[in-house]
Amino acid sequence: MFVSDMDSTLINIECIDEIADFAGFKPQVASITERAMQGELDFDASLIERVALLKGLDVEVLNKVYTERLQVNPGGKELIQFFKTRDIKSAVVSGGFTYFTDRLAKDIELDHARANELDIENGQLTGITQGSIINATAKAEFVAELCEKHKISLDQVIVVGDGANDLLMMSVGGLSVAYHAKPSVLKQANIVISFGGLDKMIDFFDE
């Protein structure tokens, strides 16, 4: 099984930063995001703070970010299709938002997706999320949950990430891959990809 982080891993952007750009305060939010991904800030608190800044934004902004800013990182689509030919399940799990993970999963044919759900009322973001926050612990639990669902062991899982929020789930998988990652992640990954696309992972498999 293949499980990947979304923002700056499977895709080219940090979605929350781009949402904030439409509200005119991307630098402020991006600074918090960067510090959280470096492991300098508590993830839950940083997410609550950033989402609160989005209060009042029209939900159409989410569509604009998806259609105008978001791109699958090079080799991503090819990698997922490769896994399909090998009957390997694929999933995305994110400290970002279901609006993007669910849409991405449908577009590139991922089998599973999990993320935080933005609360929306009358077509506007309310500045909070619904349900439990998808943090490092929740990401690792999702990996374990998928293993149980598909009756495979954790050592049969490839986990890909780039930030501090990914370290725990990377530690529970059989093979951890740091993709264009933060220094703290580079130190702990089994494999590091700092150049080229996600399809470099195809080289891990014997023909």
Image (cartoon, helix red, strand yellow):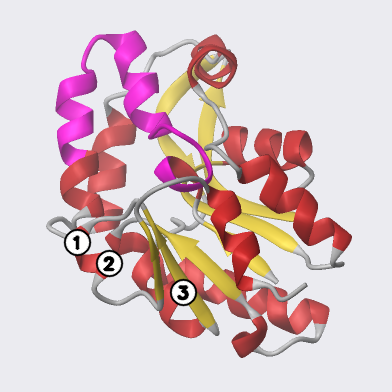
* Residue appearing at x 71%, y 45% in the figure: 78
Quadrant of residue 27 within the rendered picture? top left
Is residue 186 found left or right of 72 in the rendered image? left
Alpha-carbon distance for marks 2 and 1?
Answer: 5 Å
Q: CA distance from mark 1 to mark 3?
A: 15 Å
Q: Residue furthest front?
A: 207
- Percent across and percent down for residue 11 are 51, 38
What secondary structure prevails in the magenta region?
helix
Do callouts 2 and 3 mark residues in contact (Cβ within 8 Å)? Answer: no
Q: What percent of the width, then of the height, locates residue 124?
A: 50, 15
Q: How many marks?
A: 3
In space, the residues marked 2 and 3 are separated at their CA atoms by 10 Å
- Disc 2 marks which amino acid? Leu
Q: Which mark is residue 186?
A: 2
Circle 3 SS class = strand
Q: Position of residue 44 (x, y in %)?
A: 30, 55
- Tell me if mark 3 has few (under 14), some (14-19) or many (20+) residues whose alpha carbon lies within 10 angstroms of its own: many
Q: Is residue 204 visible?
A: yes
Residue type at the position of mark 1: Pro
Q: Quadrant of residue 83?
A: bottom right
Q: Is residue 109 toward the left or the right of residue 189 in the image?
A: right
Q: Quadrant of the C terminus?
A: bottom right
Residue pictured at 34% horizontal, 61% vertical: 165
- Binning the other alpha carbons within 10 Å of mark 2 as few (below 14), some (14 to 19) or many (20 upward) gives many
Q: Amino acid at mark 3?
A: Ser
Q: Which residues are magenta?
A: 8-32
Q: Nearer the viewer, residue 108 or 66?
A: 108
Occupied quadrant, residue 179: bottom left
Mark 1: few/some/many CA within 10 Å (<14, 14-19, 20+): few
The residue where tag 3 is placed is 176
> Which mark is first along the chain, 3 or 1?
3
Q: Which residue is disc 1 drawn over?
A: 183
